[in-house]
Image (tube, grey):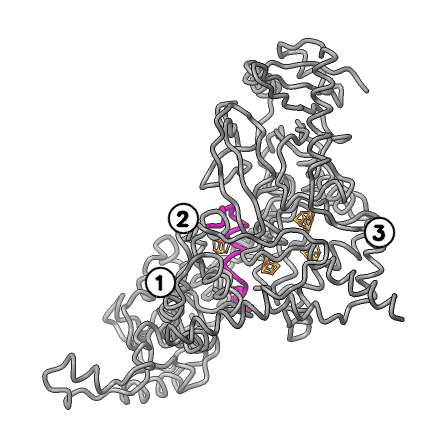
Amino acid sequence: MAGRRRKPKLAVWKFASCDGCQLTLLDCEDELLAIAGEFEIAYFLEASRAVVAGPYDLSLVEGSITTPEEVERIREIRRQSRVLVAMGACATAGGIQALRNFADIGEFKRAVYATPEYVRTLEHSLPASAYVPVDFELPGCPPSRVQVLDLLDAFLHGRRPRIPGHSLCIDCKRQGIVCVMVAEGIPCLGPVTRTGCGALCPRYRRGCYGCFGPMETPNTESLSAWFTHRSGLAPERLMPLYRSFNAAASAFQEASARYATPDQARQATETFWARAFAKRENPDGGEQAPADDQG
Amino acid sequence: MSELSVLDSRDLPELFAALQRHGFRVVGPTVRDGAIVYDELVSAADLPVGWSDEQEAAHYRLKRRDDDAVFAYAVGPHSWKRFLHPSSLTLWRARRTAAGVTIETPAEELPRLALFGVRSCDLHAIAVLDRVLLGGPFVDPYYAERRSRAFIVAVNCGHFSPSTCFCVSMGTGPKATFGFDLALTEVFEPGRHVFVVEVGTDEGAEVLRQVPHRAAEPWERAAADRVVETTAARMGRRLETAGLKEALYANLEHPRWDDVAQRCLTCGNCTMVCPTCFCFTVEDRTDLTGTVTERVRRLDVCFTTEFTYTAGKPLRQSARSRYRQWLTHKLGSWLDQFGVSGCVGCGRCITWCPVGIDITEEAAAIRSASELGERTR
Ligand code: SF4
Ligand code: SF4
Ligand code: SF4
Ligand code: SF4
């Protein structure tokens, strides 16, 4: 843009992660030249060994914070970065590795490593925001190409990124996809999941797995009660449903805690069903929704 | 009653061919992904012949029939808004060049659409969109262009969904009474399978002239009448509309709103499938180099927080306030704004709500509470 003196310095950092987010960035094949043209790629080891010293204008952080060294490193990166963006489920919610948050890390160490004493790790896998102020979070496992580009674009032009917080359902409907939950009885996390993936799973006739984490106002109690009472989902399957890539995102963490054991899951959904669904009066005598028997 | 003709079911492909010869791209019902959706139809073979559906709150299943009925289904997940008021539309593009900024409007020539198989509720829904998008001081040129060029083949409802359709109580069906070029009634009796055709416009007559047809016999007229009469008589679900707006306005703090908010996922499915919900948002998309910007219009719904994001935060934060906005707009303030109800009784929001929230049930609950209040006052 006219009047811009120097290219902003872009850095891409990796913490505990699978590199999928960085690959999403590299996957922007048509735009890579433009990215390299608009930014000075100062630190992006997955793309180039050339390293330019900080400070950086924009830091994209992939991965969760899982070791004491990483805590120090994310603090240093924060100090060096004008804008810090957490990218992906690991950096925004702790990732799949946050499953450790629900168990005893010592036990894992003993089960996996011959000499567990050599492993120095934190008890919890946490998002960057647990340790440093984060300017913006890009959800998704992995984030969407479109959203990554929009973020870079927004940064360059000084506007707010356009990363909606609403349900996946709205994008399902925009694309004219037939709802798998209603038309096939498949339990789908779409109504409580943030949009961003382009409705990939429903498009291929599968329920949403929640890769983009909780939507802005997720009602997991209602959806879960519907799953167990109408979609034929066994109550014990609720907890694992919420405990995946975004297990430690607060709304999903709350949900999986609510359904932690099969008994708790049965009780919680039954209580909710009785309170919210079953007891509502039916003033004009019309029929109640029938059991959705297709499981 | 105007002249009625009869088209033999074997000649339905001829009607398609005639529409295509007239330059129409035919869009209408077809089976895809476990539902009867609206899509482009290449030929009559794409129609859902021998298919039906079963619908309840949050439940839809395709059903095979053992006959060749063409229109034996109720309205599905799509509505005609898909074609007339598309979910995403690029309005214009600005390009920065050495000479300055140029604005380009997409110059694609829109095909003329023939909407094939429009039910009466959906004719009313299109009429509602007409009022909203064409009837006020600001005419929506994008809708106007699509709408004015569309040809409508309506279908009178012989099949309906007993637990979701409620057009009779809304005064919007099941018989198509206006707004079509041609209207078909499928008369399907043992040994006979014909379409009784009513002509609505000159262009409709012109298309029909190119299709083999004959004048309807008295029994065929009677059979066509019976089709809609039977549907009307069997429709169980209803929404009591008299005084409903007032009842809603008088009960904005009713506990029932909290009750439905417990169940509501604020997912927005109900508004997305509604054939009259028209709201959209406008986004500017820039490119990385700052040389091209696109202005894009996308359907939006009042269930997102972004919808009311004003001065730093959304006005409607609770699920309660968002569900209340949707229901009171559809059934109440729409009347103040546009002189008609925003609901045509198609039942889509009932079927496609993932947790089976039923607009007629919620409205009735609020109303009965209101009447109770009046009686005890
Ligand atoms: S398929 Fe899933 S995400 Fe799509 S509309 Fe249905 S519930 Fe929502
Ligand atoms: S509110 Fe529901 S029943 Fe009424 S027109 Fe909209 S989708 Fe159809
Ligand atoms: S109900 Fe909501 S989405 Fe529909 S027209 Fe009204 S404000 Fe718009
Ligand atoms: S009423 Fe149903 S479809 Fe509409 S937002 Fe609530 S849960 Fe979603």
Q: Main secondary structure of the magenta part?
A: loop
Which residue lies at the image location 40% right of the left edge and 74% below the top edge?
A263
- Kindly state the secondary structure of the residue where label 1 is placed: helix
Taking the image in four quarters, ligand 3 sits in the one at bottom right
Which secondary structure, mark 3?
A: loop
Query: What amino acid does circle 1 point to?
Result: Leu
Mark 3: which amino acid?
Ala
Judging by the rendered image, the residue that carries numbered circle 2 is A205
Magenta segment boundaries in residue numbering:
A157-180
Compared to residue B160, the image places residue B224 above or below, namely above
Mark 2 and mark 1: Cα distance apart in space: 27 Å
Looking at the image, residue B134 sits to the left or right of residue A225; the answer is right
- Residue A234 visible: yes
Residue at x-position 71% and y-position 33%:
B148
Residue B191 point in image, percent of width and height: 56, 14
Is B132 on the left-hand or right-hand side of A183?
right
Decide: is B19 above or below B271.
Answer: above
How far apart marks 3 and 2 lie (CA) works out to 42 Å
User: Which residue is under mark 3?
Assistant: B242
Element at badge 2?
A: loop
* Chain of the residue under label 3: B
Kindly indicate the quadrant of the structure image that contains residue B178: top right
Q: Position of residue A95 (x, y in %)?
A: 34, 73
From the image, tell me which residue sits under label 1: A25
Residue B183 location in percent, x, y? 69, 25
Q: Is residue A84 above or below residue B359?
A: below
Report how far apart the C-alphas of labels 1 and 3 lie in the structure.
57 Å
Question: Residue placed farthest to the left in the image?
Answer: A114
